[in-house]
C-alpha cells in the first residue's frame, strides 16, 4: 500500500495532479490497456506484463531524457519492445529518423500500434545480432521477455540484422543515438566487428544483462577500449558520449 501511495504521488507531481491521478488509477488500479498522455497521445499497454514498469522508466523516471549538443538525425532503438522509448525520442527529437527494432511478435504488433501516428519512426521486426539471417528467439514464461540463444523447444526463428547492414541500408553517416536493450545479446554484438559501426556512434545508451548472460559488461568495455568517451549512469542505463562528435 505504501509503495502504491508513493508511486501515486510521483505521478501527480510529474504529470500534474489531475492527469497523474487519472494515469495512476488507469494503469495501477483498473489495469486499463489504453491511456492517453498529453503531448504523446494514445499509448497501449498490457496487463500482467512489464509494460507498466517500462512506462515508468520512460515517462516518469525519464531515463532516456538526454541532452544533445545538436539535433539528432538518426536514432536506433534496438530492443524497442512495445515502442515506448521510440515514442519518447520521436517527440523529443522530431527531426530525427528512428529505426525501432523488435523481434518478438506480440511486442512488435504493439510497437506498430503505438507508433502508427509517428511519421519519423520506422519499425523492423528483426533481432539485432552479429549476422544477417535467422536466429532463435527463446521466450520466457512472460509475454514480453525473450532472449536470442540456441534453438530449443520454447523458441522460434526470427530474422536478424547487424548494425553494419543498417548503416549500409540507411546510410545515415552517424548513429546519433544508439539505444540498446537486447536481453544479453550485447555480449555477442560487442565481441565482433565493432569497428564496422562503433566509430559512427555519437551516443550509446545501453542496459547490460550480466545477470542473464555473464560477460556482457566485459565485452562492452573491451570494445570501447581505445575510444575517447565519457560515461554516466541513469537508472538501469549506462550512457556513453563519444568525444569525437
Image: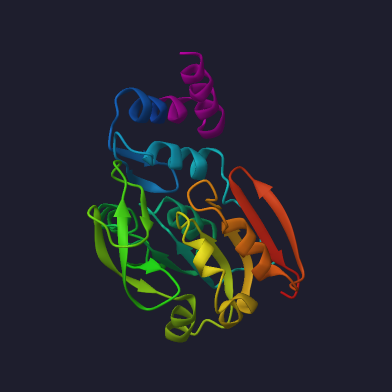
Q: Position of residue 101 (x, y in %)?
A: 39, 65
Q: Quadrant of the C terminus?
A: bottom right
Residue at image coords 32%, 41%: 45
Q: Nearer the viewer, residue 170 or 194?
A: 194
Q: Main secondary structure of the magenta part?
A: helix
Q: Is 3 located above or below residue 50 in the figure? A: above
Residue at left 63%, top 65%? 203
54 sits to left or right of 227: left
Q: Would residue 178 be counted in the magenta stretch?
A: no
The x and y percentages for residue 8 are 48, 23
Percent across and percent down for residue 236 are: 58, 45
- Rendering coords of residue 91 (x, y %): 49, 56
Magenta-tinted stretch:
1-21
Q: Quadrant of the N terminus?
A: top left
Q: Quadrant of residue 175?
A: bottom right
Magenta span includes 20:
yes
Q: Is residue 27 left or right of residue 210?
A: left
Viewer-proximal residue among 25 and 140: 140
Number of numbered discs present? 0
Where on the picture, by quarter, is residue 127?
A: bottom left
Please report the residue visible at 51 percent of the width from the left and 26 percent of the height from the top.
12
Asked whether the viewer can see residue 95, the reply is: no
Q: Quadrant of residue 235?
A: top right
Residue appearing at x 39%, y 27% in the figure? 22
Amino acid at each position: 500500500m505504501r509503495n502504491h501511495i508513493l508511486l501515486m504521488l510521483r505521478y501527480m507531481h510529474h504529470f500534474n495532479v489531475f492527469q497523474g491521478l487519472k494515469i495512476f488509477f488507469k494503469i495501477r488500479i483498473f489495469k486499463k490497456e489504453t491511456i492517453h498522455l498529453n503531448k504523446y497521445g494514445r499509448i497501449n499497454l498490457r496487463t500482467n506484463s512489464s509494460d507498466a514498469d517500462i512506462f515508468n522508466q520512460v515517462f516518469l523516471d525519464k531515463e532516456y531524457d538526454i541532452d544533445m549538443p545538436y539535433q539528432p538525425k538518426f536514432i536506433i532503438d534496438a530492443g524497442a519492445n512495445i515502442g515506448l522509448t521510440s515514442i519518447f525520442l520521436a517527440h523529443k527529437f522530431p527531426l530525427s529518423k528512428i529505426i525501432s527494432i523488435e523481434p518478438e511478435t506480440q511486442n512488435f504488433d504493439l510497437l506498430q500500434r503505438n507508433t502508427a501516428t509517428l511519421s519519423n519512426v520506422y519499425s523492423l521486426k528483426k533481432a539485432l545480432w552479429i549476422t544477417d539471417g535467422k536466429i532463435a528467439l527463446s521466450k520466457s514464461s512472460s509475454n514480453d521477455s525473450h532472449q536470442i540463444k540456441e534453438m530449443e523447444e520454447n523458441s522460434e526463428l526470427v530474422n536478424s540484422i547487424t548494425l553494419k547492414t543498417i548503416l549500409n541500408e540507411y546510410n545515415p553517416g552517424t548513429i546519433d543515438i544508439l539505444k540498446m536493450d537486447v536481453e544479453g545479446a550485447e555480449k555477442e554484438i560487442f565481441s565482433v566487428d565493432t569497428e564496422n559501426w562503433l566509430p559512427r556512434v555519437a551516443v550509446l545508451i545501453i542496459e547490460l544483462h550480466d545477470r542473464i548472460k555473464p560477460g556482457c559488461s566485459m565485452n562492452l568495455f573491451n570494445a570501447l577500449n581505445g575510444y575517447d568517451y565519457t560515461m554516466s549512469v541513469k537508472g538501469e542505463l549506462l550512457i556513453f558520449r563519444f568525444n569525437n562528435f
